[in-house]
Amino acid sequence: MTQVVGNLNSDPTPPAPPANTSVWGIGADGAISRIVSDGYGHAAGTHFVGRAASGTAASPGFKLRAQLIASYDAQPWAGSGFTPQALIQAVATEDHSATALGTGWNVWATLNGSTASQQVAHIGADKVTLPGLPTADPHVADQLWNNGGVLTISAG
């Protein structure tokens, strides 16, 4: 496997990236690490594309419902390694076929004082769900809660 590494850090051996990493950029200590893509011209833009299929590169297949298509993971240092704590995932919302390619976004986050991420939202073409909402008024101003199936904003 080919791996492209860009190391701007003085440490020649930072913690290893996840298995199967193709492109790995290591920023300098104390500096923001960026990936930049420029586009110029009237119709130009930049795109970061995550493509995925079941099967193999030689024989790709359709994704099934709930399978991951692409993901952006925010992974803070957890003491002995980096761990996903905030994620945005593109997923199949139905079994894919040549005439059906339903997709949606899952959003995951970690509550303060916790180390376990949980799904906090799903955004689909036909609905938005917030699976972690409390079912009783949290008495926190502007906090959403599920009031017997009615989305309610707490007054505090």
Image (tube, grey):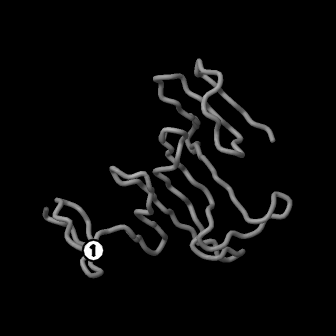
Foreground of the two, 129 or 38:
129
- Determine which residue is flagged by label 1: 135
Question: As drawn, which residue projects farthest toward the top?
Answer: 10
Question: As drawn, which residue projects farthest toward the left?
Answer: 156
Q: Please state the horizontal and vertical placement of residue 2, each as a whole percent of the image.
A: 79, 38
Q: Residue at x 46, y 59 (%)?
A: 107
Question: As drawn, which residue projects farthest toward the right?
Answer: 58
Q: Residue at x 27, y 74 (%)?
A: 135
Quarter of image, res 92: bottom right
Check disc 1 and give the amino acid type. Answer: Thr
Q: What is the secondary structure assignment of the residue under circle 1?
A: loop
Q: Is residue 74 left or right of residue 68?
A: left
Q: Residue at x 47, y 24 (%)?
A: 31
Foreground of the two, 80 or 12:
80
Q: Is residue 83 above or below residue 37?
A: below
Q: Is residue 86 above or below residue 44?
A: below
If the image is split into quadrants, where does the N terminus sit?
top right
Q: Please state the horizontal and vertical placement of residue 97, each as a whole percent of the image.
A: 70, 75
Q: Is residue 66 above or below residue 71?
A: below
Q: Is residue 131 left or right of residue 20?
A: left
Question: As drawn, which residue projects farthest toward the front?
Answer: 80
Quarter of image, res 148: bottom left
Label 1 crowd (10 A; few <14 / some 14-19 / many >=20) = some
Q: Please state the horizontal and vertical placement of residue 24, each as a whole percent of the image.
A: 65, 35
Q: Residue at x 54, y 50 (%)?
A: 72
If the image is split into quadrants, where does the C terminus sit?
bottom left
